[in-house]
Image (spheres, rainbow, N blue to C red):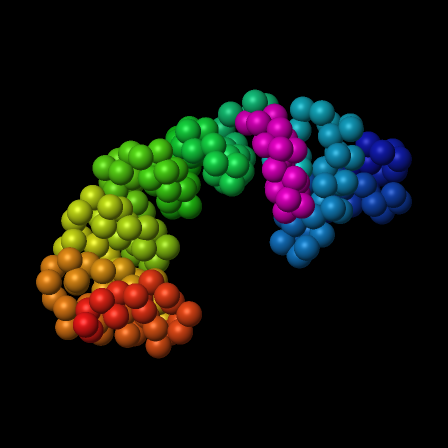
């Protein structure tokens, strides 16, 4: 494999040029991103794109590097370019959705999640992110169905189960909320928020003793939980 930077021949199994260190493949950039070397990954991607300006994977990795560096606008631009070059790049659509979510652009986030799911229908993270975007868009019924699919696909996806409980709560479905938060608390007994929400929903059912127990558990886990403390005081009067 000839290095496009210095033109030295390298072995087919080389990831980097033996002469100048130019990245011959992009997949090892993920190692830089996951080990805290985002700046190095960014610079390597820019070097690749200097020679291969139509490399969609390099743009995707560039977007990831910018994301890890906290440069969301640059990340969005790079990821938009990646999906323009390769519409079927599901990971780029998903990472773009994450960036849009961080920017509060929930409509764009939902659209990118749907694009990611088109090319990778089994992506639970994309399905979860879609459910969260729909929640923020006020589409609670659709968000409920979407997050229901998340926990059906992966019952251990506790964050999805937690937000499913929040939607049941917003919709006034006390039994649905209690079921969801009970499962969260069973999976993670030290989740103070789950116990707080269980307390709220038991209180709404008039089950004050159960509510008091949950608010007390929440305070045992997090003594600074002022919401649970206030609810507990209101029930103990």
| Residue 101 sits above or below residue 150 on the image | above
Residue 115 painted magenta: no
| Residue 219 sits above or below residue 155 on the image | below
Which residues fall within the magenta stretch?
Answer: 63-83
Residue sitting at the far bottom: 220
> In the image, residue 65 lies at what x, y percent?
66, 43
Q: Who's the residue at 40% across and 74% down the image?
A: 223
Q: Give the left or right position of residue 226, taking residue 53 as reference.
A: left
Q: Give the left or right position of residue 148, taking residue 98 as reference.
A: left
| Quadrant (top left, top right, bottom left, bottom right) of the N terminus | top right
Between 206 and 234, the residue placed more toward the observer is: 234
| Residue 44 sits above or below residue 37 on the image | above
Residue sitting at the far left: 206
Q: Who's the residue at 12% across and 66% down the image?
A: 207
The image quarter containing residue 121 is: top left
Between 172 and 37, the residue placed more toward the observer is: 172
Between 77 and 14, the residue placed more toward the observer is: 77
């Amino acid at each position: 494999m000839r290095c496009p930077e210095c033109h030295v021949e390298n072995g087919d199994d080389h990831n980097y040029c033996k002469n100048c260190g130019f990245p011959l493949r992009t997949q090892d950039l993920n190692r830089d991103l996951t080990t805290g070397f985002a700046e190095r990954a960014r610079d390597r991607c820019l070097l690749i794109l200097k020679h291969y300006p139509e490399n969609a994977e390099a743009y995707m990795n560039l977007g990831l590097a910018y994301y890890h560096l906290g440069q969301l606008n640059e990340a969005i631009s790079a990821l938009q370019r990646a999906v323009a070059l390769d519409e079927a790049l599901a990971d780029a659509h998903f990472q773009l959705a994450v960036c849009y979510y961080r920017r509060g652009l929930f409509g764009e986030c939902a659209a990118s999640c749907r694009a990611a799911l088109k090319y990778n229908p089994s992506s639970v993270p994309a399905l979860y992110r879609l459910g969260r975007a729909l929640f923020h868009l006020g589409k609670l019924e659709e968000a409920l169905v979407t997050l229901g699919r998340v926990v059906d696909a992966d019952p251990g996806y506790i964050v999805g189960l937690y937000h499913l409980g929040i939607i049941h709560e917003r919709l006034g479905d006390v039994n649905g909320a209690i079921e969801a938060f009970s499962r969260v608390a069973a999976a993670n007994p030290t989740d103070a928020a789950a116990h707080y929400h269980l307390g709220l929903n038991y209180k709404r059912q008039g089950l004050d003793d159960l509510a008091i127990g949950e608010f007390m558990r929440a305070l045992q886990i997090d003594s600074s939980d002022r919401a649970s403390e206030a609810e507990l005081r209101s029930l103990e009067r």
